């Protein structure tokens, strides 16, 4: 995996110090003697490798691609550890390779230090890697950004990451994580299917608003808690959450078929919403590295994006569902058919995810783990009590039928 340090600590220069495995430079054509690289004759190949690095990794200042003023490189042994810090790496690149060094084919590194003139260290910097697009997410660049005003931030990018802001502004972080939240809900098919199961039997905007609002509040609660590392971190927890999300689809679909009570639906929606919040948090945690110094802003922007995406889905889903219920599958039979399809899909997801969960080792109980579990159990019980209290006091319009009856009427 390539690794890089990017620094704007110099007065009017930014510096990229990067280490790339030799096997990625087939086109550089390093001279070979038997199974060893001919280090003494490798200077032209190192220059070709430097050109390839500058082509594959682009540094931007205020969205303007920078052009290098100087580039230096060298070969290094697989055992070299100089890239553990920026200072060591920068000094190491300037040192010549010791004579007699033996580097086997495809088993060493090309180390490079590339210098770019910049307008101001206070600019917004970003980076893009286009190396190995055919490898996709498998080829990762471990990156450490070292700005003048802080100790640095670490992240991992790929050719699929696009242009990544190293020190994003407030507005850029908020906009980026809002888009990320929208994309996460629109591509989360299990969340969308659960949302469909929620609204299939509902009649009237009051009922829809009550149930969807409870779901929103519940998943926001666990999403925010997870972002602050208040969720279990063991290997069993993600597959457990994914299995529980699939189970929530099955339950809601079966409840639609058997019969629905509004108070019970609000309560169960709140409980399942807590589970879905953990699922949303995984999309956030994977991208939190790109928030820069705006962690809180990015957290709330991601949540806003999820809510905007959810509203967008409902704006499309509800009219289509009304058309289906009125003209394609009218009456209770239509609701049963739609719910049965959802239940079947959720059931297969649940079995597949449960198989993964079953193979995951469960950790031994610890005091810290028990404390986290107690925190969430207390929170869930408190939330359930609050939701139950509110559900019993939901206002009804005059003459509005209970949800269980409304679900039967065609």
Image (spheres, rainbow, N blue to C red):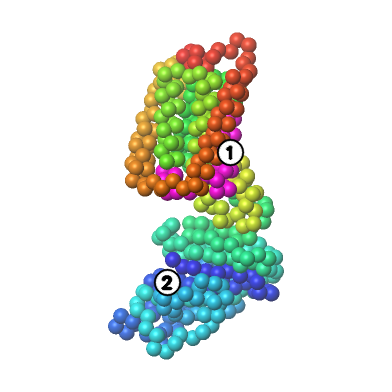
**Residue that label 1 marks:** 221
User: Residue at 44% of width from left, 83% of height from top?
Assistant: 44
Q: As drawn, which residue projects farthest toward the front?
A: 367
User: Residue at 37% of width from left, 74% of height from top?
Assistant: 107
Nearer to me, 142 or 168: 142
Q: Secondary structure at mark 2?
A: strand
Query: Would you say the magenta stretch is mainly helix, strand or loop?
Result: helix
Quarter where residue 302 is shown:
top right
Quarter where residue 150 is shown:
bottom right
Q: Secondary structure at mark 1?
A: helix
Instruction: Report x, y in % for residue 352.
Output: 34, 40
Residue 21's disc number: 2
From where the camera sits, is residue 185 visible?
no
For the N terminus, the quadrant is: bottom left
Q: Is residue 126 above or below residue 77?
A: above
Q: As drawn, which residue projects farthest toward the top?
A: 399
Q: Residue 227: say if magenta.
A: yes
Q: As drawn, which residue projects farthest toward the bottom?
A: 99
Instruction: Report x, y in % for residue 67.
Output: 59, 72
Which tag, 2 or 1, sits closer to the chain's start? 2
From where the camera sits, is residue 137 visible?
yes
């Amino acid at each position: 995996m390539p690794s890089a340090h990017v620094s704007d600590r110099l007065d009017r220069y930014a510096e990229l110090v990067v280490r790339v495995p030799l096997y990625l430079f087939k086109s550089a054509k390093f001279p070979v003697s038997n199974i060893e690289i001919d280090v003494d004759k490798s200077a032209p190949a190192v220059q070709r490798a430097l050109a390839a690095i500058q082509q594959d990794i682009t540094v931007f200042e205020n969205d303007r691609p920078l052009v290098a003023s100087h580039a230096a490189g060298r070969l290094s042994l697989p055992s070299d550890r100089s890239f553990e810090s920026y200072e060591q790496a920068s000094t190491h690149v300037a040192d010549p390779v010791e004579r007699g060094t033996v580097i086997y084919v495809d088993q060493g590194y090309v180390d490079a230090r590339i210098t770019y003139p910049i307008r101001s260290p206070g600019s917004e910097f970003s980076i893009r890697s286009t190396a190995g697009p055919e490898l996709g997410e498998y080829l990762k660049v471990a990156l450490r950004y070292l700005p003048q005003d802080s100790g640095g931030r670490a992240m991992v990018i790929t050719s699929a990451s696009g242009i990544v802001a190293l020190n994003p502004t407030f507005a850029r972080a908020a906009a980026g994580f809002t888009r990320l939240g929208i994309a996460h809900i629109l591509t989360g098919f299990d969340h969308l299917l659960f949302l469909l199961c929620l609204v299939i039997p509902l009649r009237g905007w009051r009922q829809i608003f009550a149930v969807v609002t409870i779901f929103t509040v519940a998943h926001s609660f666990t999403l925010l808690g997870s972002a602050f590392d208040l969720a279990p971190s063991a290997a069993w927890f993600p597959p457990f959450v994914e299995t529980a999300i699939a189970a929530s689809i099955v339950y809601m679909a079966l409840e639609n078929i058997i019969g629905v009570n509004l108070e019970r639906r609000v309560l169960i929606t709140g409980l399942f919403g807590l589970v879905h919040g953990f699922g949303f948090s995984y999309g956030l945690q994977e991208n939190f590295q790109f928030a820069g110094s705006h962690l809180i802003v990015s957290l709330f922007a991601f949540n806003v994006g999820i809510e905007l995406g959810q509203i967008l889905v409902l704006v499309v889903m509800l009219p289509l569902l009304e058309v289906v219920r009125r003209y394609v599958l009218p009456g209770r039979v239509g609701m049963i058919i739609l719910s049965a399809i959802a239940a079947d899909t959720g059931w297969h997801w649940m079995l597949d995810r449960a198989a993964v969960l079953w193979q995951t080792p469960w950790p031994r109980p610890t005091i810290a783990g028990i404390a986290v579990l107690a925190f969430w159990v207390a929170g869930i019980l408190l939330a359930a009590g609050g939701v139950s209290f509110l559900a019993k006091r939901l206002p009804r319009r005059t003459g509005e039928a209970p949800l269980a009856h409304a679900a039967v009427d065609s």
